[in-house]
Image (tube, grey):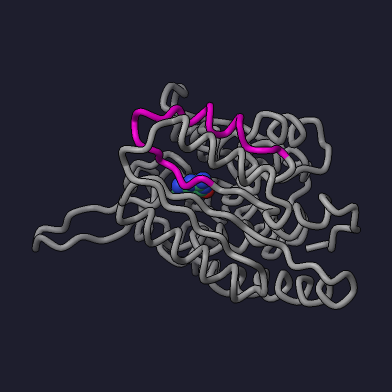
Amino acid sequence: MAETRLIDGKAHAAGLRQHVADAVAALKQAHGFTPGLAVVLVGEDPASQVYVRSKGKQTVEAGMLSFEHKLPATASETELLDLVGELNDDPAVDGILVQFPVPPQINQHRVINTIDPAKDVDGFHPINAGHLWSGEPSLVPCTPFGCVYMLKKELGTLEGAEAVVVGRSNIVGKPLAGLLVQENCTVTIAHSRTRDLPAVARRADILLAAVGKPEMIKGSWIKPGAIVIDVGVNRIALPDGKTKLVGDVAFAEAQGIAGAITPVPGGVGPMTIACLLRNTLIAGCRRRGLPVPKL
Ligand code: GUN
């Protein structure tokens, strides 16, 4: 049985964060400016609070300015949109991220559409989504970029590879497919209505799972030697009452079949914030007409 290599997302993320920190230090020295990231949290969802804290901490560690804004769970859509408007107008703010999900009285699309596309470090604004598909430089969604970043580090080139993305969300599946096309992969987007999903998955040299269903993708769906990127983060209950995090791929079954796989946790997850810092740096440079460091 061939051994399955683990793709170490923590190490890749640490490398990218260091590149960002070096570029931030160089910018400060050469141009006297420090990029700033504003993160907005509405409500008190515990998982979101952890993410937001982590984003703030890593922003500061990279040498950038961090602005945190908290609104109560009862905040109206107008209150949130007014805050986004203020951040759009604030010259110290280069990137704006509103943590999702937002409470049900607030329309997520309206929030995304209100953020200045030049500060849209999530890459969710339709202008940035359009730029991605038209091959223009853009702020691209963080998790998909993190997947492709790791793949390129692991494989060198992705050119000509059969890539199958399982999942078609606006946040992961669709932009991931766009980035893979840009890397000259042959891309299939599969989803819950795909006929014979196991057979489609088995075509993949690179199989990317972003469905949010615990361990849905079985070992028998993986072509021997394929590279598997597991974007899923699912908390499941164990018989002893404890919980654990698992991905969308049945990790144990993939051993000895996949050529390499990202673990959950410790795979794609750590890349997301590193890519957010990268986007903040890029947005800061663009907004000031400075050359964007290659990262
Ligand atoms: N909630 C979970 N992931 C994300 C993300 O990438 N961006 C935002 N804004 N909210 C999230």
Relative image position of residue 97 (x, y in whole percent): 56, 48
Q: Classify residue 87 as left or right of residue 247.
A: right
The quadrant holding residue 259 is: bottom right
Q: Is residue 150 visible?
A: no
Q: Is residue 61 above or below residue 190?
A: below
Q: Classify residue 266 as left or right of residue 103.
A: right
- For image coordinates 42% across by 56% down, the residue present is 254
Relative image position of residue 175 (x, y in whole percent): 63, 38
The quadrant holding residue 197 is: top left
Relative image position of residue 23 (x, y in whole percent): 79, 71
Q: Is residue 253 above or below residue 84?
A: below
Q: Find the magenta span and give its range.
A: 98-117
Q: Is residue 77 above or below residue 45?
A: above
- For image coordinates 58% across by 42% down, the residue present is 204
How many labels, in total? 0
Q: Classify residue 143 as left or right of residue 219.
A: right
| 156 within the magenta span | no
| 99 within the magenta span | yes
Comparing 191 with 198, the one in front is 191
Q: Is residue 138 visible?
A: yes
Looking at the rendered image, the quarter that the C terminus falls into is: bottom right
Comparing 62 with 184, the one in front is 62
The quadrant holding residue 165 is: top right
Which residue lies most toward the left here? 240
- For image coordinates 41% across by 27% down, the residue present is 192
Relative image position of residue 134 (x, y in whole percent): 80, 30
Comparing 214 with 34, the one in front is 34
